[in-house]
Image (cartoon, rainbow, N blue to C red):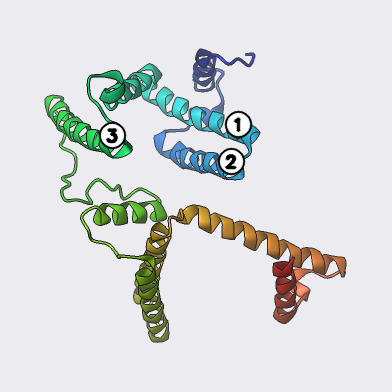
Amino acid sequence: MTPSPDMNRLLAIMAVLRAPEGGCPWDIEQDFASIAPYTIEEAYEVADAIRRGDMPDLKDELGDLLLQVVFHARIAEELGAFSFPDVVLAITTKLIRRHPHVFGDKTAGNPASVKTLWDDIKRAEKRERVAARKAAGLPEEAAQSGLLAGVKPALPGFLRAIKLQQKAASVGFDWAEARLVLAKIREEIDEAEAALAAGDQNAIEDEIGDLLFAAVNLARHARVEPEAALQRTNDKFQRRFGFIEAALAEEGRSLGEASLDEMEALWVKAKQK
């Protein structure tokens, strides 16, 4: 096989990798569940390349993410469920249907009106999906009702917290300003401290969860994306800790040979730099 920008070449390579005769043993033994973690990981790596503004890396990571879509579609095709063209048809149909103000006769002059259109279309899609599953003899999807029903439990914690808070805020259940969220964070810190003092592990987990949820609320009110903020702090911590390690290495010592006070002093130097 030779490299090619042709999408069909990628599909052909995936088919060869999965071929029972002559394929790759690792690729052959994979299923939806086994490669799902890689799909999530690749999506995060795409986001990281965007955060760093690294265009060559973004190109590579988008390719890795595309491979995950092709991999899942190939497994589905082998099972007789659907194929890659079906995936493309589904998304192109959805894009056209959800943009009647572009491809149809609807009008939407601003993002708010576009969102109203989307919400109406999504509700119609849900009714169609329920009818199609019923016609195919498939079990009904798990019953979901209420304002927060559409927020999927499988989402990463920070993202799910934001979506839950945004949904609640849409009907007025929200703090009026960021300073009030700060007061809530102080309250949660006190409750976490009490749980730690009591040594109740379940209560400790609950209170730390409440504290994190409140911190996400503060980020939302401050128009800060919490995942990006945490990654920025992660980078800062890694950079400063690397300074400590390098400084000790210049003295011919390892991290294990330094006291906490010495490492703290080097940490302060790292901050100053």
Residue drawn 15% across and 45% down? 143
**Which label belongs to residue 49?**
2
The amino acid type, in three-letter code, at marker 3 is: Val
In which quadrant is the N terminus drawn?
A: top right
Residue drawn 30% across and 65% down? 176
How many numbered discs sit on the rendered protein? Answer: 3
Q: Of marks 1 and 3, which one's residue comes earlier in the chain?
A: 1
| Mark 2 element type | helix
Above or below residue 228? Residue 242 is: below
Which residue in the structure is indicated by mark 1? Answer: 60
Local crowd size for mark 2, using a 10 Å CA cut-off: few (<14), some (14–19), many (≥20): some
In which quadrant is the C terminus drawn?
A: bottom right
Are circles 1 and 2 on residues that touch, CB within 8 Å?
Answer: yes
Residue 199 image position (x, y, % from top left): 40, 83
Q: Of marks 2 and 3, which one's residue comes earlier in the chain?
A: 2
Q: Nearer the viewer, residue 238 or 42?
A: 238
* CA gap, disc 1 and disc 3: 33 Å
Residue 13 occupies quadrant: top right
Residue 98 occupies quadrant: top left
The amino acid type, in three-letter code, at marker 2 is: Ala
Which residue in the structure is indicated by mark 3? Answer: 114
Are circles 1 and 3 on residues that touch, CB within 8 Å?
Answer: no
* CA gap, disc 2 and disc 3: 29 Å
Q: Of marks 1 and 2, which one's residue comes earlier in the chain?
A: 2
